[in-house]
Amino acid sequence: MSTTSSSAAAPDAVGESPPKFKFLPPIGSPGYYLLLAAVAIFILGPLGGIAAAYMNFSLGFFVGGQVLAGILGSAVTYGYGPEGKHGANYMQTMAASVASLSAMAVLIQAMVWMKMPMPPVGPLVLFFCCIGMFGVGLGMLYTPILVDRLKLEYPSGHAVANILRALTDKRLLKKSIGQLSSGVGLGAAFAFLVEKVKFFGATGISGSTIGAGMVVGSRIAGAGLTMGLVGWAITPYLVSIGWLQEGEPFRKIGFLIALAMILGAAIVDLSLIGVEAVRRLRTAAAEQAAQPEEPAWKQVNMGRLIAWVLFWGVALVLVATLLLGQPLGFILFAIALSSVFVLINGISCGISDSNPISSAFVISVLLMSGLGLKDPTVGLMAAAILLASCSTGVDMQQDRSTGWRLGTNRVIQFRFQVVGVFMGAVLCVVLANVFMKAYPVLTIDTFAHPEAKVDQWQSAMTYKFVGALRDLGDLPPYKVKALGLGLAIGLVTEIVRKSLHKSERYKAFVHGSRGGFATGWVLDTVLLPSPYASSFGGFVELVVAAWFAAGGALSSLINTLTTKPAKVMAAEGGSAEGEAKEQMADAAGPKEKVEGDELPEDMSSTSLVGGGLIAGEALFALAVGLIGLLALVNR
């Protein structure tokens, strides 16, 4: 791909902005891109990938590493002044791609749980690489529609753009890196205590669990605890009606209810999103004729992009069928579904900041089951195409929204993302093997062996994948009822929540005083929690949901004591489907500068320390694993 006009007009033209420090290569020079790529591929990418894989193995979801990579990347490009934001954006783009594919290591864990024959390392890396390349191509192909014409918000992309602008301030950069470093140190210390001190290990405490709660806030983390407590309370009844066997945890059936709740909420949201998308398309069509020619940084060669998507689609088919022995029909079906869901999930993420990749996986499994598929191996490999392509493709769109706000060269950003996909495909397989060999508990199928003690290694994403695949082609009646129950809860809850949150009187009440804020918190966390957030309690054990909620409560308490009531929801991330993300975007605004040492909402102290806790514990776990593996090799 290439831009359709001279690169001299692009933000990265050589010599446009001389660096402050003489040892730095000029912007746009080969040395400049080599510097950015080296930092991103060898430092920021692996750091984000390790954290993402660790979070999926422990909690079953991962927090995107864009903020972390943006902050650390800005330290590298600080010497370039305001124009350094483009270089930092390239690095966070590459690092985010590495993290997105590294998180897919849980798919390999699912193969182990289901005792599937493990493909050779080379073909497996190639399989994930083809999916990632196909996914980013689709994401880029849909970018002109979602980012340029519909002008979707992509709240996290907006946040990263604000952060990259703000970090040209030396004081702010120093403060944010200091808070991240403190979190990393605390995370490593936490992990050491859990590993070495029996008392701490017995409590089920985990720095990454608390850190994740601190990142998302109490409305999301507390909602997960609410469902966990409800599940614990009704477990005896579920045993009495035969939905659970004596001694089985709630999550053995709760994961189905939780998945259906997400689907129910998604039906409501996607319906509203569809109406909004049609409205925006009509508005955009009317405005298109009056728009001037696109600037050079935004232009791409669409012919080459289409050829890219077709090439990697064909490569994916060949790798899946010839090297991995999968049937052609279901691989083509998965690729076709991916082409649809990268668009649907992209709209969802653009409006609500939610990329429902797990829902896409489960929907694809249910559809293939309806078509007569009964082989779980085929189901997993085909659904993996949907999962990984939606993850990388929507991540591509979100990164393009950041670039759209900064004016970053779109083609160069794409190239950085492609390199990140390759690195992510390699790390995905490497990290899966390292973690599972270092921590054999990760190989235990807790769906089939609920009595197993796994401590922090909840593997909630693997749990729901395996649970969906186990009944492929033969779903027992009581599980159909559980799905129906969850679907109804998700639909009704989301309809009521949407109606309530649209009320101007309700919004004025909850944002007008601390009493109103407290009422809104109780509704969002206990009485009427978001299905996206509360579903977490159906995927993990109660003790994990409790520590997750403790992290959220700690974060929200600090923010409540230090922030005005109307901004606390923004500081803590608000509800899961993005109602508070809109407030967060409003609070952050399109500010180019930050007064004094105040951090933007997305860079709050609790959020940065929480992210550091995750990274610190992940790095400690990896270090312990590598030391153990080296000891085995040297025997």
Image (spheres, helix red, strand yellow):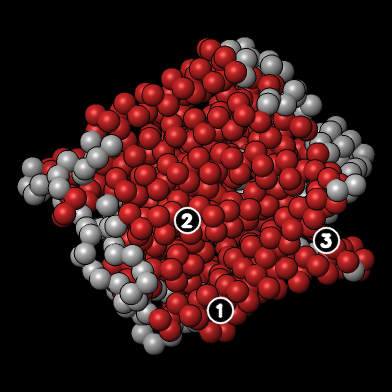
Q: Is mark 3 on a helix, strand or loop?
A: loop
Q: Which residue lies furthest to the bottom in this view?
A: 596
State whether residue 371 is above or below residue 562. Answer: above
Question: Which picture quadrant has residue 511?
Answer: bottom left
- Per the rendering, the mark at residue 38 is 2
Q: In this view, does 391 lie to the left or right of 351?
A: right
The residues tagged by marks 1 and 2 sit, at their Cα atoms, a distance apart of: 23 Å
Residue drawn at x 60%, y 18% as measured from the top left: 323
Which residue does the numbered mark 1 point to in the structure image?
178
**Nearer the observer, 390 or 550:** 390
Q: Is mark 2 on a helix, strand or loop?
A: helix
Residue 7 in the image: x percent, y percent? 19, 50
Q: Is residue 382 left or right of residue 119?
A: left
Q: Which amino acid does label 3 sit on?
A: Gly
The residues tagged by marks 3 and 1 sit, at their Cα atoms, a distance apart of: 28 Å
- Per the rendering, the mark at residue 204 is 3
The 10 Å Cα crowd at callout 2, few under 14, some 14 to 19, many 20 or more, is few
Residue 479 in the image: x percent, y percent? 73, 29
Residue 182 in the image: x percent, y percent? 63, 76
The residues tagged by marks 2 and 3 sit, at their Cα atoms, a distance apart of: 38 Å
